[in-house]
Image (spheres, grey):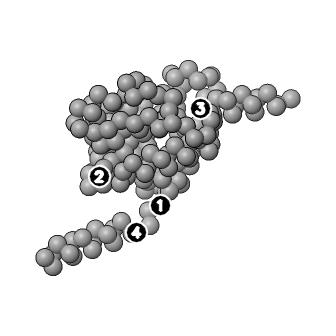
Amino acid sequence: MHSLCAAVDAHAAELDQAITLEEKIINDWDELAARVKGQRPLVFTNGVFDILHRGHVQYLHEARAQGACLVLAVNSDDSVRRLGKGADRPINALGDRQGVLAGLASVDFVTMFSADTPLQLIAKIRPEILVKGGDWPVEKIVGATEVQGWGGRVLSIPFQHQRSTSNLLQRIRERLP
């Protein structure tokens, strides 16, 4: 019994140690899988997060509330360009987007993916909860079938604040002389 208590205390002390923003950014998926192994239920989401706005922050807060740990996968710069969001996107480079997102209390770990979808990453870390924003119906969320197949849940979180980076950029461009 004493050994078990000592192990629990040691683990709690590890969790209490301050983690730097850089330590929250893990692009090596094997390392990420090892870091989240005992942090269950694991929540996963992904996106571009080019210019962070209130809608993003609210969404990530709600996603994190679904489990013990939130992993946020960010599209690489090349992946963003393939999404067709515009020739000048992303506005912020991957490292900058990851650094800003790592600063959010709701985000436990930030990683990246270069493919068009994060399906390989989802299969690697096997989250119990897969989350996307309210503009994604559950049946269209990449990885939904896989997560549901291993007994997990897939959620489409309704927007609390109607914001989008594309609309924000359009408003900025309209105001430029």
Q: Residues within 10 Å of mark 1 (few under 14, many from 20)?
A: few
- Measured from the top left, where is residue 162 in percent x and y? 62, 35
Say which of marks 4 and 2 sits in front: 2
Identity, as a three-letter code, of the amino acid under mark 3: Pro
Residue furthest out toward the left: 1
Identity, as a three-letter code, of the amino acid under mark 1: Thr
Say which of marks 2 and 1 sits in front: 2
Q: Residue at x 61, y 29 (%)?
A: 89
Q: Residue at x 38, y 32 (%)?
A: 118
Q: Residues within 10 Å of mark 4 (few under 14, many from 20)?
A: few
Rendered position, 37 above or below 86: below
Quarter of the image for the N terminus: give it: bottom left
Q: Which mark is residue 90?
A: 3
SS type, badge 1: loop
Q: Which mark is residue 17?
A: 4
Say which label, 1 or 3, has the lower sequence index.
1
Q: Which mark is residue 40?
A: 2
SS type, badge 4: loop
Q: Which mark is residue 153?
A: none
- Measured from the top left, where is residue 83 in percent x and y? 52, 23
Say which of marks 2 and 3 sits in front: 2
Residues at marks 2 and 1, CA–CA distance in whole angstroms:
21 Å
Residues at marks 4 and 2, CA–CA distance in whole angstroms:
19 Å
Q: Is residue 177 left or right of residue 121?
A: right
Say which label, 4 or 2, has the lower sequence index.
4
SS type, badge 3: loop
User: Residue beneath label 1, please?
Assistant: 20
Residues at marks 1 and 4, CA–CA distance in whole angstroms:
10 Å
Q: Residues within 10 Å of mark 3 (few under 14, many from 20)?
A: many
Residues at marks 3 and 4, CA–CA distance in whole angstroms:
34 Å
Residues at marks 2 and 3, CA–CA distance in whole angstroms:
32 Å
